[in-house]
Amino acid sequence: MKTIKLIIDGKTAEVPENTTLLKAAKTVGIDIPTLCYFELKDMNIENRPGGCRVCVVEVKGRRNLAPACNTMVAEGMEVYTHNIRVLNARRTVLELILSDHPAECLTCAKSGSCELQSMAQQLGVREIPYQGEQSKYRKDTSPAIIRDVDKCIMCRRCEMMCNDVQTVGALNAVNRGFMAVVAPAFEMNLEKSPCTYCGQCVSVCPTGALTEVDHSRNVINALADPAKTVVVQTAPAVRAALGEEFGLAPGTLVTGKMVAALRRLGFDYVFDTDFAADLTIMEEGTELLDRLTRYLKGDKDVKLPILTSCCPGWVNFFEHNFPEMREIPSTAKSPQQMFGPIAKEYFAKKLGINRKNMIVVSIMPCLAKKYECQRDEFKVDGDPDVNFSLSTRELAHLIKASNIDFSSLPEDDFDNPLGESTGASVIFGTTGGVIEAACRTAYELYTGKKLEKVDFKELRGLENVRHATIDFDGLPINIGIAHGLGNARKLLEDIRDGKSQFHAIEIMACPGGCIGGGGQPYHHGDSEVIKLRASALYREDAGKPIRKSHENPFILELYKDFLGKPCGEKSHHLLHTHYFDKSAGVFVEE
Amino acid sequence: MAKIKLSEKKIQELKDVCKAFNNEKGELINVLHKAQSLFGYLPAELQEIIAKELNVSVAHVYGVVTFYSFFTMQPKGIHPVSICLGTACYVRGAEKVLEEFKRQLKIQVGETTPDGKFSLSCLRCVGACGLAPVVLVGEKVYGRVAPDGVADIIAEYNT
């Protein structure tokens, strides 16, 4: 590749052609501020509309300042990234953006993690000299995501995520000029759009324009109510990211401290969604083996590949976009929703309390979980199996508000029986983890042999779409894996067109899987953070004494005591679900 | 999908338009142009059909429709009134003429009167600057229009 030599702030940079000035500057230690620009390296995710103009630099010989994120290097270029002309222009640009932004930082949900706020700090803006009309738009609250468009700076990151990465197509820039907003079709509310609540728009929004619906208050009220037994479950990906909110390095595992914090917050029982993940493997793995055996016996009606169904964003996606294929995914509920009925129908009875007096809270890396726990099919006489779902970020806020010094907490253990889990369930939180966990169990159940090597390294990694063939003692099982809904769409289209050769496919809606979920601490475009979270989960798995779901003693006890057998009548009733066609009635109300 | 109010025949016509452009995503603006000339406006159900045919999101189609002032989701009136706001017309008081139309018809720019008779829009220069300010009603051109002449123009069509 051709190399280009240029001078940036007096330093000589040598970079391949078609490199942006922004990246060229980074190679010589110059960090040009950006606002609309966004990149997740190694995941093919980049947003550079060149719209905000915060990254402008002076290129000698050019009349106008050039946006560094969107200008390519050229031989012999002389670039100035912070001379007086650039600094003045950059500040003016920011002042103009701020002149149409509500100054509500004191009460804004994004305060402290807001990129616009930190930019104003970095550039030392102390007053906004431009006063005039501000654009006003209605606030839109959906079951999981709040749109407060007045805080939008039209960076278009959410649009890029929603359309290019996730191919959901819920959000688009509409209208023009001062009236421009990012909105669903016909400016309907998000709830009426094909939004999957994956929350990737929230995870990249630089301001408070897109945030999650916060259920912390409901949880605080439940904890304060002596009549309620409050049970909490924590998803695998939370323990690999929560520490970041308390200044710990990305990839630090805080399982024990998290449990201790939850106990101090006043939860009566601190349980683990991982337990339910083990249960998911029992049900989903049995379903896979059943379909596979019938298929091998020549049953033409059997639907293969089987698709995982743990991810609620993904479930929403196929209900909206591929309703005709809704018979293909596993009917197994997600771990969150398996935990609910086990807590309220099994554990509550053990305690001798009415299910209405038990509140089940989930801590999730996810925003779609907020919607999932509100679905009607997951309620009994109006009482939801899972009452409230909090994001990793909300849990961090709750801990801070409760005067708990996180770093000095001891390492506590989960309560039993719903707190015991295996290594297989821990890796549910990363792309490839669910299917690896399923393979560990399905292999042993199918072959009747002991699996010598439990690590399926061929299923790991961050490539967008992966496939691997696993040897089930002479029977080759073809596995597909996709993370990010755009990648999932490709696999689904192949299945629809009869081109798919897979027996089983794992899909997670968010890039990286749950570790990159919409409810996780903001990664601000640093893909290293996501990788470190993944390796933390694999570390936790490797350190567990039991690493296969079907060897979890409390799972075995649960089947013996209560459920009977996997995919049996009771399991079917409590742990399986069905899907809906949501392609209809989305946009225009009559 | 919206409850389709368009007739099967109209829907087929629209699908044929998309097909004429090879159902190409990149031809969205051309398809919308053609659709608007066929239907007079671009209602929601029509945008949904186009989105499906071209395999783009409805939000994207709506984004394009609302970006270009040429496209409208409102059915035009029987007598579409257009006021030129080009430089020459503007400096000779076109804005006051526009205000008068808005006041008398009780509609904003881009809207249609409830009886479906008049719709109001603005345009930039019809190439008759010598007649500024210029107003068009349908194909008919009115030159040197003053605010106090607005009532007469409306009356011409209000019989």
Image (tube, coloured by chain):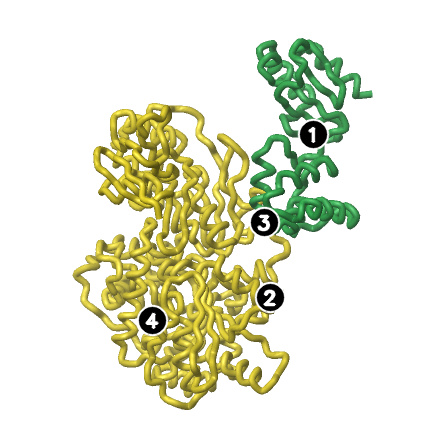
Name the N-terminal-most of marks 3 and 1.
3
Q: Amino acid at mark 2?
A: Arg
Q: Residues within 10 Å of mark 2 (few under 14, many from 20)?
A: few
Residue B63 rendering spot, x and y as whole percentages: 56, 40
B70 relative to A483, above or below: above
- Chain of the residue on which disc 3 is drawn: B
Mark 4: which secondary structure?
Answer: helix
| Residue situated in front as seen by the camera: A294 or A109 | A294
- Relative height, residue A542 to residue A509 (above, below): below
Residue at which label 4 appears: A426
**Which residue is drawn at the image coordinates 43% and 63% (left, top)?**
A387
Which residue carries the number 3 mark?
B56
Q: Residue furthest bottom?
A: A448
Mark 1: few/some/many CA within 10 Å (<14, 14-19, 20+): many
- Pick out the residue farthest to the front: A2
Mark-to-mark CA distance, 2 and 1: 45 Å
Image depth: mark 2 or mark 4 in front: 2
Separation of residues labelled 1 and 4 (CA atoms)? 60 Å
Gap in angstroms between the C-alphas marked 2 and 4: 32 Å
Please indicate whether residue A68 sits to the left or right of residue A182 in the image: left
